[in-house]
Amino acid sequence: MPHYNISTAIELTNRETEVLQLVAFGLSAKKVARALDIATCTVERHIENVRLKTRTRNRAHMIAYVIREGMLPVQQD
């Protein structure tokens, strides 16, 4: 499997990180919107912004990428 080295650091906003954490826990955009008291379309925009920043293909790829790169800490139970 090829290893891709990304030389530039990817900066996420606090809100993008918040949304990303909830998506990583399996919440839908609608449930994230309710949890954060924001519009569903705003959640979708944050998700798309993160996906574009990380140059990933879809949500699953995006979540895997941010965990692998240490951008989203994985909580150990």
Image (spheres, grey):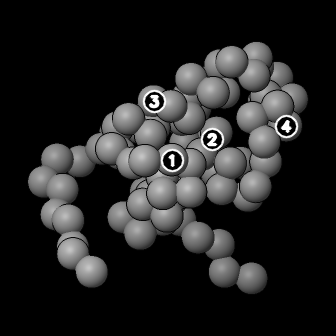
Q: In this figure, which residue is indicated by the disc labeled 4?
A: 31
Of labels 2 and 3, earlier in sequence is 2
Q: Which amino acid type corresponds to the residue marked 4 in the rendered image?
A: Lys
In the image, farthest residue toward the left: 7
Which circle, 1 or 4, is nearer the viewer? 1
Q: In this figure, which residue is indicated by the disc labeled 1?
A: 58
Classify 50 as above or below 74.
Answer: above
Q: Residue at x 16, y 63 (%)?
A: 5
Q: From mark 3 to mark 4, how far is it between C-alphas?
A: 19 Å
Of labels 1 and 4, earlier in sequence is 4
Q: In this figure, which residue is indicated by the disc labeled 2?
A: 18
Classify 59 as above or below 36.
Answer: below
The answer, for residue 70, to whether it is visible in the render is no
Which circle, 2 or 3, is nearer the viewer? 3
Rendering coords of residue 16 (x, y %): 54, 35
Which circle, 1 or 3, is nearer the viewer? 1
